[in-house]
Image (cartoon, helix red, strand yellow):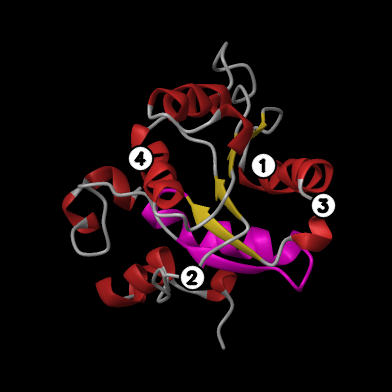
C-alpha cells in the first residue's frame, strides 16, 4: 500500500490518477441517517441532496459551509439550504453548519450539529455529497474524525464536466 505523499505524479497513468481522485466506490443504494453535503457554490450538490431526500434515502439533509474565510457574505450552507427550500424540502428536515471554511472544518463542525440534533450515537450511515473529484479527501477526512461505527456512502453531485471519464479534457482539473 503506497502512501499518497510518496507518489510521483509525473509517473502515474490517467487510470491511476482517476482512481486516486474519484475513488473506486460507487453509491451502493443504501439508506442513511442523514445526507451530509460538503460546502460548495454549485447547485449540483443541492440537486443531488434533494434527489436522495425525495427518494427517501435519508430523513435529514445537513448542509456544511461557511463564508470561505470572508470570501462570501452569505455562508455557502445558507445558500444550499435556501435552494433546497425552493425544491420543497421541509425546513425541519434541513440542518445547517455555517462556520467552516474547508473540508476538515466542515466535517468537524458538522459532528457537533449531528450530536446536537440527531444524537451522534444514533448515526450509523451518512450519505456523503461533494464534487466527484473530492472523493479521496472527503472520505479520508470523515474516516479520520468521525466515530468508527459510522459508515459512509459516497453519492457525488452530478456534474457534466470533470467526471472520472472526462476530467483530463479540462486544464483546470490538472492544476
Mark 4 or mark 2: which is in front? 2
Give neighbour class at mark 1: few <14, some 14-19, many 20+ (Cα, 10 Å).
Answer: many
Q: Quadrant of residue 2?
A: bottom right
- Between the C-alphas of marks 2 and 1, the distance is 23 Å
Give neighbour class at mark 3: few <14, some 14-19, many 20+ (Cα, 10 Å).
Answer: few
How far from the left and from the top, in percent, is residue 80? 48, 29
Farthest residue, direction bottom: 1
* Label 4 with label 2: CB-CB less than 8 Å: no
- Between the C-alphas of marks 1 and 3, the distance is 18 Å
Q: Secondary structure at mark 2?
A: loop
Which label is found at residue 139? none
* Label 4 with label 1: CB-CB less than 8 Å: no
Residues 128 and 29: in front is 29
Q: Which residue is mark 2?
A: 30
Q: Which residue is mark 4?
A: 47
Horizontally, residue 16 falls left or right of residue 37, namely: left
- Between the C-alphas of marks 3 and 4, the distance is 26 Å
- Earlier in the chain: of badge 2 and badge 1, it is 2
- Between the C-alphas of marks 4 and 2, the distance is 18 Å
Q: Which residue is mark 3?
A: 119
Q: Which residue is mark 1?
A: 106
Magenta stretch: give its range.
Answer: 130-154
* Residue 142 in magenta stretch: yes
- Earlier in the chain: of badge 1 and badge 3, it is 1
Residue 16, can we see it? yes
Mark 1 or mark 3: which is in front? 3
Residue 13, can we see it? no
Q: Is residue 93 above or below residue 174?
A: above
Amino acid at each position: 500500500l503506497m502512501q499518497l505523499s510518496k507518489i510521483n505524479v509525473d509517473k502515474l497513468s490517467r487510470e491511476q490518477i482517476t482512481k486516486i481522485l474519484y475513488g473506486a466506490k460507487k453509491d451502493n443504494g443504501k439508506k442513511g441517517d442523514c445526507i451530509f453535503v460538503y460546502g460548495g457554490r454549485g447547485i449540483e450538490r443541492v440537486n443531488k441532496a434533494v434527489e436522495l431526500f425525495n427518494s427517501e434515502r435519508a430523513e435529514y439533509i445537513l448542509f456544511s459551509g461557511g463564508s470561505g474565510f470572508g470570501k462570501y457574505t452569505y455562508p455557502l450552507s445558507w445558500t444550499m439550504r435556501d435552494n433546497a427550500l425552493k425544491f420543497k424540502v421541509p425546513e425541519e428536515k434541513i440542518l445547517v453548519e455555517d462556520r467552516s471554511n474547508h473540508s476538515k472544518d466542515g466535517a468537524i463542525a458538522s459532528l457537533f450539529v449531528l450530536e446536537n440534533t440527531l444524537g451522534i450515537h444514533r448515526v450509523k450511515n451518512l450519505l456523503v455529497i461533494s464534487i466527484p473529484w473530492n472523493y479521496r479527501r472527503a472520505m479520508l477526512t470523515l474516516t479520520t474524525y468521525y466515530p468508527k461505527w459510522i459508515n459512509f456512502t459516497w453519492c457525488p453531485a452530478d456534474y457534466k464536466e470533470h467526471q472520472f471519464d472526462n476530467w483530463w479534457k479540462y486544464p483546470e482539473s490538472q492544476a
